[in-house]
Image (cartoon, coloured by chain):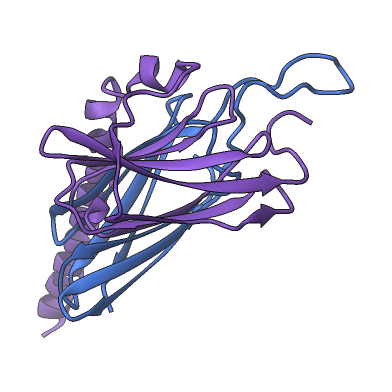
């Protein structure tokens, strides 16, 4: 009985260690393997990429007036079969803010972005090799970049 | 490694999992000046975020320093109750962090 108990404890311990190991490798190795793919040129570009045609199937939700340009909540929703969704802040020095891919980018994505000054928040959805966009103008009363 | 800096929640409704996450990160663009020293704060921002639900890729995002400090991310992805959600980020200085939660 006593040895049996010990065996149980041992098994439990090794199982727990196993899951931690899996979590660590999933968390650390996966992003680094693809990190080299971070599109540096696109993010450092001073101009926006191909915006494509305006589309009514994309909805950009952002405030009309942002009191604090450092935190502008943005929600992009669309009804297309998207390969990727990109968010641009037209007045920023480097307009591309974020790119989303995968099933999570299919319907709705929300985040908070910085805006240097008043400008448009533009969502570009790439679908079937074509670009579609929608924009929303946001008035910024206090800048978010620099200080 | 810093202490756990990701808060993440996932809720399933009708086959769609809504994930909401908050990460702790300074998100420095590299363009801001330290007024005391006159030097620029070095760029330090999350440039990649990935999430998996039940082992399947849920979202993969590239970010710039244009995302606000302590970033918030919400998205919808397919999944079911009880699935394991893992969200992880990597920043431009090579740090990374991940968090796991169960879909409710």
Farthest-out residue, right: B36
Where residue A37 sits: x, y (%)? 26, 22
Left or right placement of residue A131 versus residue A46 in this view = left
**Residue that protrudes farthest toward the bottom in the picture:** A1
Residue B18 location, quadrant: bottom left
**Image quarter of residue A57:** bottom left
Quarter holding the C terminus of chain B is bottom left
Q: Which shade is chain A?
A: purple
What percent of the width, then of the height, locates residue A58?
32, 53
Q: Is residue A32 left or right of residue A63?
A: left
The vertical placement of A21 against A119, above or below, is below
In the figure, the shade used to draw chain B is blue
Residue for point 48% across, 24% down: B93
| B62, above or below B83, in the image | above
Count every numbered label the image shows and give the total.
0
Residue at 51% from the left image edge and 52% from the top image edge: B5
Image position, residue B67 (x, y; %): 53, 40
Residue at 72% in and 24% down: B32
Say which quarter of the image contains residue A104: bottom left
- In the depicted structure, whether residue A28 falls above or below residue B55: above
B53 or A143, nearer to the observer: A143
Image coordinates for residue B17, horizontal then vertical, percent: 25, 70
Where B38 sits versus A146, above or below? above
Q: Residue at x 66, y 34 (%)?
A: A116
């Amino acid at each position: 009985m006593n040895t049996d108990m010990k065996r149980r404890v041992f098994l439990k311990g090794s199982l727990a260690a196993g899951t931690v190991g899996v979590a660590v490798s999933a968390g650390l190795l996966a992003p680094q393997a693809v990190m080299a793919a971070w599109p540096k040129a696109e993010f450092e570009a001073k101009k926006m990429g191909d915006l494509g045609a305006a589309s009514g199937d994309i909805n950009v939700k952002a405030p009309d007036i942002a009191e604090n340009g450092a935190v502008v909540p943005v929600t992009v929703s669309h009804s297309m079969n998207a390969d990727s969704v990109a968010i641009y802040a037209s007045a920023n020095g480097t307009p591309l803010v974020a790119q989303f891919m995968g099933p999570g980018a299919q319907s709705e994505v929300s985040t908070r972005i910085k805006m240097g000054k008043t400008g448009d928040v533009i969502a570009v959805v790439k679908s079937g090799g074509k670009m579609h966009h929608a924009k929303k103008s946001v008035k910024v009363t206090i800048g978010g970049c620099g200080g | 490694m810093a202490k756990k800096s990701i808060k993440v929640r996932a809720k399933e409704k009708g086959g769609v999992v809504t994930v909401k996450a908050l990460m702790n990160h300074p998100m420095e663009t590299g363009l801001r000046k330290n007024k005391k020293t006159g030097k620029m704060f070095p760029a330090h921002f999350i440039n990649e975020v990935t999430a998996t639900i039940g082992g399947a890729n849920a979202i993969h995002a590239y970010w710039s320093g244009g995302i606000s400090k302590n970033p918030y991310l919400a998205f919808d992805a397919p999944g079911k109750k009880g699935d394991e959600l893992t969200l992880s980020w990597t920043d431009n200085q090579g740090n990374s962090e991940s968090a796991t939660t169960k879909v409710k």
